[in-house]
Amino acid sequence: MEQEVIYRIALSRLKGINKALAQHIHETVESLETFFELPESQLQKITGIKGRILHEDNRQTALQEARKEMEFIRKGNIEPLYFTEPNYPQRLLDCIDAPPLLYYRGNADLNSSKIISIVGTRRATEYGKDFCETLIRDLSEYFPQLVIVSGLAYGIDICAHRCALRHGLNTIAVLAHGLDHIYPANHRSTAVEMVSHGGLLTEYTGYHRMHPAFFVARNRIVAGLADAVIIVESREKGGALITAGIAESYHRDVFALPGSIQSESSAGCNHLIRRNRAALITSADDLVEAMCWNAPQKQIVQRSLFPELTNEEQIVTNYLTQKGEGQINRMTVDLNQPLSQLLSILVELEFKGVVKALPGGIYKL
């Protein structure tokens, strides 16, 4: 069996290979052993494939690299996931550009009944991080077996992973490099925890260093693994929008958190919603309803992004949502509220965890 794994790794290492081409090779060649032993001319006749992918030198080089990778897999407790095997993420089989082989270190079920991907800006605001916390907390109460997928990047990605761990959900990071290191290094402790409560997944061999292009390629796996992709804050040209576009092409449900029109961090999400490329999401219930998921009745608790508010508190909250933040003196003018009354409302909102007081009499959600 180990030799078969080596052949699979070698096939996946050939430049230009993808799942569709690998499938064609399986259907036309007797075995992978035969594929790596036959001369190029004979393989061309059998498969109809032309080009460097069948060059004997390329195939032999791939085999040598695969043998080294097998050593890394054995020592690193890594599970190779080949597209013909049941442990391969079955949702990815629907994606034409899915990698034929993945490397996995973890214990979460990649074919769990419910998987969502949460991605967003690397410069997350408190608004976005608070929403992640609320969303994942509520979903964990509805669906304890839910798996959260993201990319281990700064901002929303790492926030989603940590929130999932905090609320007892398995979470999977899709990496843009091999499993011999973690990027960013600051997230290593979280990644180590995830191995026991989720996992680390990549299409790159062990010692493969990251490259800017790999991050874009990684996004297709983030999108393809999930039933739905949720964008929590993205700038107008943020990388999360690439993931949203890929998810659309895979016919995945896409959701986006709306934000202030004055917030750069929400410009991308607002654009997706405005163009009907994403459904608006403000709570776990929005997702449950849109996905037609049946949450256990005894666990359902109606929650929105904010707790129950009075009319006066809602007015102030709406103001801060639109403006992004407010200075107390300016707010008294804009809202036509006496200073003492406004301060009383803000103190109550702060107590409820809706607003934060900053130096200079500034308040923000």
Image (cartoon, helix red, strand yellow):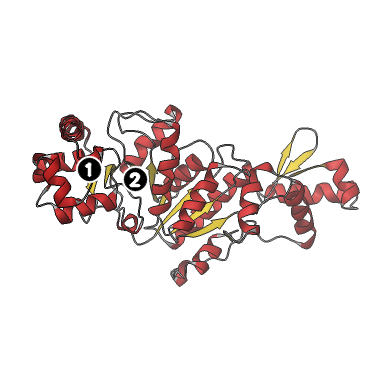
Classify 158 as above or below 304.
above
CA distance for labels 1 and 2: 16 Å
The quadrant holding residue 41 is top left
Can you tell which mark lies on residue 197? 2
Can you tell which mark lies on residue 267? none
The quadrant holding residue 14 is top left
- At 41% across and 61% down in the image, what residue appears? 143
- At 91% across and 48% down in the image, what residue appears? 333
Instruction: Tell me the residue that label 1 is attached to.
Output: 79
In-image side of 364 versus 93 (left or right): right
The quadrant holding residue 217 is top left
The quarter of the picture where the N terminus appears is top left
Looking at the picture, how far across and down is residue 335, in whole percent?
Answer: 87, 52
Depth order, front residue of 101/333: 101
Counting residues from the start of the chain, the first of labels 1 and 2 encountered is: 1
- At 17% across and 56% down in the image, what residue appears? 27
Q: Could you tell me the amino acid type at mark 2?
A: His
Depth order, front residue of 292/203: 203
Classify 113 as above or below 37.
below
Q: Could you tell me the amino acid type at mark 1?
A: Glu
Classify 195 as above or below 231.
above
Looking at the picture, how far across and down is residue 58, in whole percent?
Answer: 20, 33
In-image side of 287 versus 56 (left or right): right
In-image side of 257 versus 175 (left or right): right
SS state under label 2 = loop
